[in-house]
Image (cartoon, grey):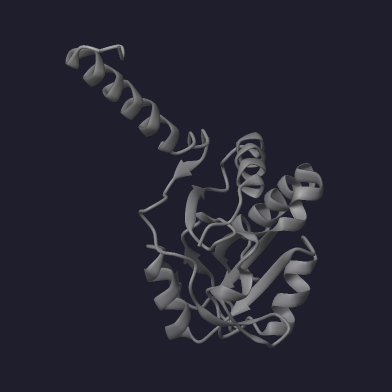
Amino acid sequence: MKPFLPRRVVLTLLVLLAVVALGGCQREPQPEWRLNDVAGHLPDLDFKLTDDNGKAVTGADYRGKVTLMYFGYTHCPDVCPLTLTQLHVVLGRLGPAADKVRILFVSVDPARDTPQIMHDYVNAFDKRAVGLVGSGADVEALAKRYRSAFTREPDKGDGAYDVSHSSAIYVFDAAGKARLLATPSSSQDDMVHDLTLLTSLEPHA
């Protein structure tokens, strides 16, 4: 005679099996970021500009690398050189993982920042930095895409002027997805921590 299981026991077993199956399908725990998590709140990395070698490039050209995008200009008296120095130190602390990272320095001063000037400027800070230039309209559209802003101040004379600009550092993963937001005041430890995690993730389109 075959053993008989009460219907209540059978239903209980089915529920337990379903719970186990669902548990196996759950996503892996998300990294504990220290910087501002902007995943799902900002668009993917996308632009059409010219790099500091005079080559037309798009956001897709940097797929496969974690990218740190920053808006600035070569005549910036303070925050831009300080930020690029900070990023250089952070990448130095990453060790070999820094090869998976690129700094994208987008000029908000197209009247003065040529590809050659940008090339000399960014390479003075880090060889993994890329200078990007474009028309005023292209750069303005890109800034608006990421809720950034910049304004040319009145001339000081002899063609000298400053450009006020936002100072956020936009961090995109290797698939070009916006993931994190940092500022020049973000601690090096926090940036190293998050970039270490981000460079270890497998890119997902």
Q: Position of residue 39 (x, y in %)?
A: 42, 50
In the displayed structure, does residue 89 sit left or right of residue 185? Answer: right
Nearer to the camera, 138 or 4: 4
Residue at left offset 69%, top offset 48%: 86
- Judge whether 178 appears above or below 56 on screen: above
In the displayed structure, does residue 139 sit left or right of residue 112? Answer: left
Nearer to the camera, 77 or 198: 198
Q: Which quadrant of the figure has residue 94? A: top right
Nearer to the camera, 25 or 168: 25
Residue at left offset 56%, top offset 82%: 49
Nearer to the camera, 171 or 158: 171
Residue at left offset 39%, top offset 32%: 21
Q: Position of residue 133 (x, y in %)?
A: 59, 80
Question: Seen from this angle, which residue lies furthest front?
Answer: 1
The mark tally for this picture is 0
- Judge whether 51 appears above or below 66 on screen: below
Residue at left offset 66%, top offset 49%: 199
Q: Position of residue 121 (x, y in %)?
A: 74, 70
Question: Seen from this angle, which residue lies furthest left?
Answer: 7
In the displayed structure, does residue 64 sit left or right of residue 21? Answer: right
Q: Position of residue 149 (x, y in %)?
A: 41, 66
- Judge whether 162 appears above or below 178 on screen: below
Position of the N terminus, as image quadrant, is: top left
In the displayed structure, does residue 48 sit left or right of residue 99? Answer: left
